[in-house]
Amino acid sequence: MATKTIAGKMVQVNDEGYMTNPAEWDRDIAVEIARDEGIDPLTDAHWKVIDFCRTEGERTGKAPTLRQITSGTGLSTKELFTLFPKGPAKKVAHISGLGKPEGCV
């Protein structure tokens, strides 16, 4: 398993750069990953989605799908694409310290 330093912390990642141990995640890591993804700053709307995904990830053991995120947050798909351009489910899973959502290429 590979490791990477994010926000000054050594974390385990897979080949695609997704964290493999969600327990290593914190908000500072989220901010740095988001910045690397071209999302800066993280707004309250971003945190609403990130917090939802973290909660779902803890409950189910996997990153939520786009449909689960829209249903759980009350945001539309269009709003999610505005917050997390070019693949919101993958980007928010990455920023949230979760694995890549199932079904994502």
Image (cartoon, grey):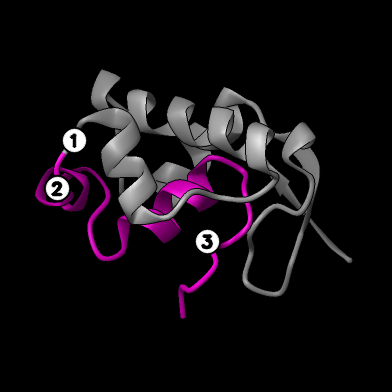
Residue located farthest toward the left when viewing the structure as drawn: 78
Amino acid at the residue labelled 3: Pro
Does the magenta segment cover residue 34?
no
**Which mark sits nearer the N-terminus, 2 or 3?**
2
Decide if residue 100 is in sight here.
Answer: yes
Question: Is there CB contact under 8 Å for labels 2 and 1?
Answer: no
**104 left or right, relative to 41:** right
Element assignment for label 3: loop
Element assignment for label 1: loop
* Closest to the observer, 23 or 53: 53
- Image x and y of residue 57, in percent: 61, 39
Instruction: Read off the residue under disc 1.
Output: 75
Task: Give the residues in magenta.
Answer: 76-105
* Residue 101 - label: 3
* Other-residue count near label 1 (Cα within 10 Å), few / some / many at <14 / 14–19 / ≥20: some
Which quadrant of the structure image shows residue 1? Answer: bottom right
Amino acid at the residue labelled 1: Leu
Question: Is residue 46 depicted above or below 36 in this figure?
Answer: above
Label 3 – label 1 distance at C-alpha: 18 Å
Question: Is residue 99 depicted above or below 70 in this figure?
Answer: below
* Residue 82 - label: 2
**Which mark sits nearer the N-terminus, 3 or 1?**
1
